[in-house]
Amino acid sequence: LLVPGDDGEDVADDVPLTQLGHADLRQTLNWSRINISFRCAPGQNDEGYVSLVEGRLTVAQAVPMIARGDKEGSADCVRHTEAGILSKAGFKVVYKPEPTVPGHVAVSATADWDENMSQLFDECFIEYVRGLLR
C-alpha cells in the first residue's frame, strides 16, 4: 500500500500541475513578441521523465521552489495542466518525491518518447502564464 506522495503513486486525474519555463520578450516600436519555451521531453539525465509540480502555481511561487538560484529571472513563465489530461493522452503521471521540491511529479511516456509524444505532451497544457520577478 502506497502512502500519498510515495514514489510511484498515480496522481489523481483532477490534480492541477505546473511546469516552469522561459519567456523571451522581443519588442520593436510597433510589435512585441514573446517566445516561450518549456521542456517537452526528458533530458539525458532525467531518468526518462519530465518534471512537473503539484498545484496551480504562479511564477512567483514556482521559481523559489523549482529554480532556486535563478537570480537572472530566466525562469519566468509557467504552464498548467491536469494529471487526467496527461493520462488520457498516454502519459504515466506519478508522484516522485524530491526532498527540496514538495509535490514533485514525474511524467513519462507509455510509448517511445519521440517527436509525436513531445507534441502530444505540449498539447496537454491548457494555460500559460508569464510573470515578472524583478
Image: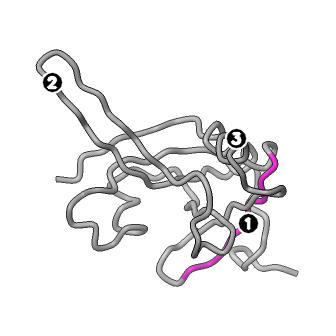
Q: Closer to the N terminus: mark 2 or mark 1?
A: 2
Count of labels in the image: 3
Location of residue 75 by image quarter: bottom left
Q: Secondary structure at mark 2?
A: loop
The residue that label 2 is drawn on is 28
Q: What crowding class fits label 2: few (fewer than 14 Cα within 10 Å), some (14-19), or many (20 or more)?
A: few
Residue drawn at x 32%, y 55% is 60
Q: Earlier in the sequence, mark 3 or mark 2?
A: 2
Image: 16 above or below 45 = above
Magenta residues, as a range? Answer: 90-98
Between 26 and 86, the residue placed more toward the observer is: 26
Residue 81 drawn above or below residue 45: above
Q: Position of residue 121 (x, y in %)?
A: 66, 45
What kind of residue is marked 3?
Leu
Question: Dot 3 lies on which element?
Answer: helix
The residue that appears at 46% across and 53% down in the rendered structure is: 57
Task: Say above or below: 94 vs 24.
Answer: below
The front one of 102 and 111 is: 111
* Pair 1/3: label in front: 3
Instruction: List the residue tagged with mark 1.
Output: 94
Q: Which residue is mark 3?
A: 120
Precedes in sequence: disc 1 or disc 3 = 1
Coloration mode = one colour
Q: Nearer the viewer, mark 2 or mark 1?
A: 2
Tell me the quarter of the image containing the N terminus.
bottom right
Secondary element at tag 1:
strand
Question: Separation of disc 3 and disc 2 at Cα?
Answer: 33 Å
